[in-house]
Amino acid sequence: MRVRLFESSGLSRAELMQYGWISGDHNPIHFDEKVADGRGLPGLIVHGMFLYCIVYKAIDDFLLEKSPDFRIKELSSKFSGMTFVNDSFRVEVELDESKELSDPSARNKVFLLNKDGEANCIFQAVFIRRNP
């Protein structure tokens, strides 16, 4: 079963600047269009860890709706594409229906999809119940 967890119309340059200031990541490909263009990029790239945080929050909110006892035990990711400033994206989860949601052996997939529905990042997620 695949469930949409979050949808965004895009992150602004100001949001990238705020995240960069908070995280300490001041790589100019996130803030300076001339630098991004000089590196052959079609625009400013959203920080991978910023997207990771958004995905984590979307999953956490989804689990809290199911039960306040569910938690994320593991979350690994593989980025295969870039998300650019002002690009819309969405987060979807594909649950391992052969197992219970809180079964640590369940392998759930979470997708960060670009505006064309292509996966920019695929996450493997394991959920547990805090008080089994």
Image: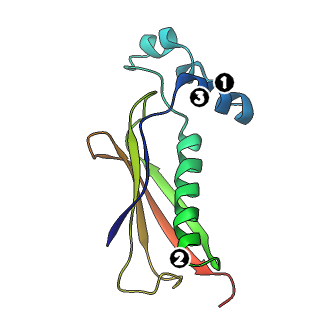
Secondary structure of residue under mark 2:
helix
What amino acid is labelled 3 in the image?
A: Leu
Left or right of 52, for residue 95? left
Give the percent coordinates (x, y) of residue 51: 53, 44
Toward the left, the furthest residue is 116
Dot 1 or dot 2, earlier in sequence: 1
The circle drawn on residue 16 is 3
Kindly report the distance in space between the C-alpha atoms of the residues bearing marks 2 and 3: 31 Å
Examine the rendered structure and indicate whether residue 95 appears above or below residue 30. Answer: below
**For residue 16, above or below residue 35:** below
Q: Secondary structure at mark 3?
A: helix
Instruction: Estimate the x, y position of residue 19 in percent, counting from the top left.
Output: 65, 33
**Within 10 Å of the Cα at label 3, are there few (<14), some (14-19), or many (20+) other Cα atoms?**
many
Q: Is residue 72 positioned above or below 43 on the image?
A: below
Circle 1 — which element?
A: loop
Residue name at image x 38 percent, y 77 percent: 96
Quarter holding the N terminus is bottom left
Q: Please tell me whether mark 1 or mark 2 is closer to you in this view.
A: 2
Residue at x 39%, y 42% (from the top left corner): 89
Residue under pointer 2: 66
What amino acid type is highlighted by mark number 2? Lys
The residue that disc 1 covers is 26
Q: Are marks 1 and 2 in contact (CB under 8 Å)?
A: no
Amino acid type at circle 1 is His
